[in-house]
Amino acid sequence: MKDSRAWVVIGEITRPHGVQGAVKVIMHTDYPHRFDSLAEVYVGRDDAEPQLVSFALAGRQEGQVICHLGGVESREAAEQLRGLLLMIPRDQVVDLPPGHYYIFDLVGLSVYTEAGEYLGRLKEVLQLGANDVYVVEAATREQDILLPAIEEVIVSVDLDRGRMLVSLLPGLLDL
């Protein structure tokens, strides 16, 4: 994709459903209701510019949505879509409350301590039971730094400046 930050994946086509071109889509969104009013969606792969197509929700089954996409009228045509991603432009995401962030906005942030020490870049967010864990690709260590996403550790996030400020609790950098 030309600019992956311009697109947000909201689903992935898993397989055809029925014989008239419907597909099953596993949702990649915390807002499944977005499919209820969706009239158009972009379809594509990570490595290509997505194409705008019409979208019609046909139902839900086993945690997936069943839909019809523009121009797809047979099971064979639907089979060709297997693995394609459903995307929306970045400016159409649901607004989050203050202090909450999308993972795709956090990944890539520069991480600094309160003392101004550069720790590295946030490369991944692990979504675990009690809280998320931020994986920082360390600038001066061989091993990644794991930071719990809790108020005591994450002091501030500045998306405009591409920075995250953290407070290192005792033992967080111990190997």
Image: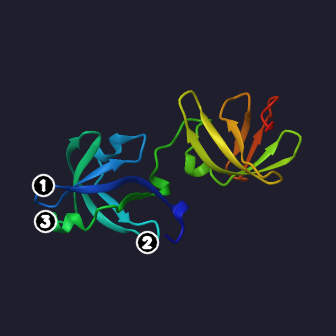
Q: Residue 154 sits in which quadrant?
A: top right
Q: Identify the residue under disc 3.
A: 74
Could you tell me residue 123's position as x and y percent?
Answer: 65, 52
Dot 3, crowdedness within 10 Å: few (<14), some or many (≥20)? some
Residue at 29 percent of width and 51 percent of height: 25
Q: How is the image coloured?
A: rainbow
Residue 2 versus residue 30 in the image, above or below: below
Q: Identify the residue under disc 2.
A: 49
Dot 2, crowdedness within 10 Å: few (<14), some or many (≥20)? some
* Extreme-left residue of the structure: 19
Q: Identify the residue under disc 1.
A: 18
**Is 105 left, or right, of 60 in this rendering?**
right
Could you tell me residue 78's position as x and y percent?
Answer: 21, 64
Lower sequence index among marks 3 and 2: 2
Which amino acid lies under the numbered mark 2 shown in the image of this protein? Answer: Glu
Inter-mark Cα distance, 2 to 1: 28 Å
Residue at 14 percent of width and 63 percent of height: 75
**Is 132 left, or right, of 169 in this rendering?**
left
Residue at 80 percent of width and 46 percent of height: 112
Which amino acid lies under the numbered mark 3 shown in the image of this protein? Answer: Ser
Could you tell me residue 148's position as x and y percent?
Answer: 67, 34
Could you tell me residue 160's position as x and y percent?
Answer: 69, 52
Which amino acid lies under the numbered mark 1 shown in the image of this protein? Answer: Gly
**Front label number (2 vs 1):** 1
